[in-house]
Image (tube, helix red, strand yellow):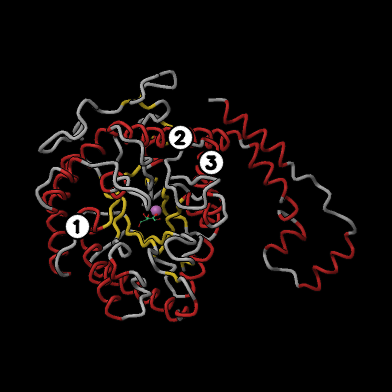
């Protein structure tokens, strides 16, 4: 892999390849904990973490919010003569950034990378032209595609949803977009294809046929899966749960809801979950809860790494910075068997007033260091085994005898009830949560 890629123009001059300098370094443009080649738990850090850069936040979002105009006038967009040239320059900027950072993967929506045309055929042509250029960049740098997706929420035509739109014509237009985005993902060797619900949900039941919309969503996903498999796609499809925003009630509410939906419609073989930390918070769950819930049913797939704000109730998409949360998340990911096709995609944006070119680097460096710490702490917890032993001991009464028989389904309710009346009084064992929290803090401080 080349040290870093520069296209027709260097968009981040003065910033070179970001290197590991260790915890004592005071260089803001160096890794303090993320040492890509370091072996942790028998595997390189980079292979545990599989970092991906989100095209939409890092190279498209311009800092505009509902109260104010853009504050990040990206030169790759501002200096381009037309949207096609902007798409080409953006690709150069993206690969320069990704290779300087040393991340291995990226993720994109169709409309992040190539402009919408006057009709579906023209949009597809624009995407195909970008795909050919992106393929060359991937080959030249070794950067890979973690997953692709289609943006089925920005254009006004999707104001009533895409696959769940009450008008059939819009469902068909959404299909044209998804088909083209799947083709692009396959052409680029994408390891996954993601469906985030976008506007698949409702604002009011007074104008909504909920059952019909869910049936249509499942039908749409089934067609997309069948098409992709027919075209030779070997990767994983992800559903990304989110409880609300932009609709009041998104159908893909949280991990458990999506697992039920996938099983209900026979999609459980091909689809896994892409869990986003901020979405978990919006659903009233911890990030680790969503990860463990997905893993418990065999649906863990990939992660959108970010964080919300405990005081704000919306999707702030901030860069991860909590070692505590990252440690618990990496522990849950370890229990899920680690990443195979998935990875840690920074679905996060710098703040509107972070306007230095170096801010985008510092944001990602911080996020990568945070997960490197999380990985290190999780490995320490796993190797030491104290917490797992506590959990095992807590359930030991199911390991043998009557308890084991119950767990295997070998006891009737009558037999169980009989045992209950014979056993007498039980259940006075401490859960020791405070002690375990102290143990976790010890692991965290012992960096
Ligand atoms: C929206 C969100 C999306 C998905 C991809 O909240 O997370 O960016 O990750 O469509
Ligand atoms: Co996301």
Q: Locate residue 194, reporting x and y percent.
A: 35, 59
- The disc placed on residue 187 is 1
Above or below, comparing residue 117 to residue 290 in the picture? below
Q: Is mark 2 within 8 Å of ligand 2?
A: no
Labels 3 and 2 touching (C-beta < 8 A)? no
Residue 182: x %, y % from top left: 25, 63
* Mark 3 burial class by Cα count in 10 Å: few <14, some 14-19, many 20+: some
Is residue 393 depicted above or below 188 in this figure?
above
Q: Which residue is mark 2?
A: 370
Q: What kind of element bears circle 2? A: helix
Viewer-nearest residue: 48 or 365: 365
* Foreground: disc 1 or disc 2: 2
Taking the image as shown, residue 111 lies to the left or right of residue 66, namely: left
x 20%, y 33%: residue: 4
Tell me where residue 144 appears, x and y as whole percent: 26, 46
Quadrant of residue 319 within the rendered picture: top left
Residue 357, quarter of the rendered image: top left
Q: Secondary structure at mark 1?
A: helix
The numbered disc on residue 325 is 3
| Lower sequence index among marks 3 and 2 | 3
Q: CB under 8 Å between callouts 1 and 2?
A: no
Q: Tell which circle, 1 or 3, labels the residue nearer the N-terminal end.
A: 1
| View quadrant of ligand 1 | bottom left
Instruction: Return the disc, 1 or 2, that comes first in the chain's sequence.
Output: 1
Residue 210 is left or right of residue 59, and the answer is right
Give how far apart the Cα atoms at labels 3 and 2 are: 9 Å
Around disc 2, counting alpha carbons within 10 Å, would you say few (fewer than 14), some (14 to 19), or many (20 or more)?
Answer: many
Q: CA distance from mark 1 to mark 2?
A: 33 Å
Residue drawn at 68 percent across, 68 percent down: 409
Rendering quarter of residue 32 = top left
Q: Considering the image in quadrants, where does the N terminus appear?
A: top left
């Amino acid at each position: 892999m080349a040290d870093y890629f520069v296209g027709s123009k260097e968009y981040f001059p003065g910033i070179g390849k970001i290197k590991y300098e260790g915890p004592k370094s005071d260089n803001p443009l160096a890794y303090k904990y993320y040492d890509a080649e370091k072996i942790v738990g028998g595997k390189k850090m980079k292979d545990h973490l599989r970092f991906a850069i989100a095209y939409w936040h890092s190279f498209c979002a311009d800092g505009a919010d509902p109260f104010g105009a853009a504050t990040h006038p990206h030169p790759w967009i501002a200096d381009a003569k037309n949207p096609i040239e902007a798409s080409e320059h953006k690709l150069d900027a993206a690969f320069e950034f990704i290779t300087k950072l040393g991340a291995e993967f990226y993720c994109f929506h169709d409309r992040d990378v190539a402009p919408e045309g006057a009709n579906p055929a023209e949009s597809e042509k624009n995407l195909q032209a970008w795909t050919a250029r992106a393929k060359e960049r991937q080959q030249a740098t070794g950067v890979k595609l973690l997953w692709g997706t289609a943006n089925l929420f920005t254009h006004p035509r999707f104001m009533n949803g895409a696959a769940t739109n009450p008008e059939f014509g819009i469902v068909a237009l959404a299909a044209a977009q998804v088909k083209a985005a799947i083709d692009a993902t396959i052409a680029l060797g994408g390891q996954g294809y993601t469906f985030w619900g976008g506007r698949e949900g409702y604002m009011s039941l007074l104008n909504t046929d909920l059952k019909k919309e869910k049936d249509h969503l499942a039908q749409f996903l089934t067609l997309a899966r069948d098409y992709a498999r027919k075209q030779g796609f070997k990767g994983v499809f992800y559903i990304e749960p989110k409880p609300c925003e932009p609709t009041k009630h998104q159908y893909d509410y949280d991990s458990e809801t999506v697992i039920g939906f996938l099983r209900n419609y026979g999609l459980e073989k091909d689809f896994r979950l892409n869990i986003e930390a901020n979405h978990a918070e919006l659903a009233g769950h911890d990030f680790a809860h969503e990860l463990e819930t997905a893993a418990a049913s065999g649906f863990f797939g990939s992660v959108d790494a970010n964080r919300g704000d405990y005081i704000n109730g919306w999707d702030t998409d901030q860069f991860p910075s909590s070692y505590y949360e990252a440690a618990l998340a990496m522990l849950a990911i370890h229990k899920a068997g680690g990443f195979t096709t998935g990875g840690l995609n920074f679905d996060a944006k710098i703040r509107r007033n972070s306007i230095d070119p170096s801010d985008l680097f510092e944001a990602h460096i911080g996020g990568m260091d945070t997960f490197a710490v999380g990985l290190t702490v999780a490995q320490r917890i796993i190797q030491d085994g104290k917490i797992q032993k506590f959990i095992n001991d807590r359930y030991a009464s199911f390991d043998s005898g009557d308890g084991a028989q119950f767990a295997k389904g070998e006891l009737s309710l009558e037999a169980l009830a009989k045992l209950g009346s014979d056993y007498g009084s039980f259940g006075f064992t401490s859960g020791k949560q405070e002690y375990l929290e102290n143990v976790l803090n010890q692991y965290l401080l012992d960096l």
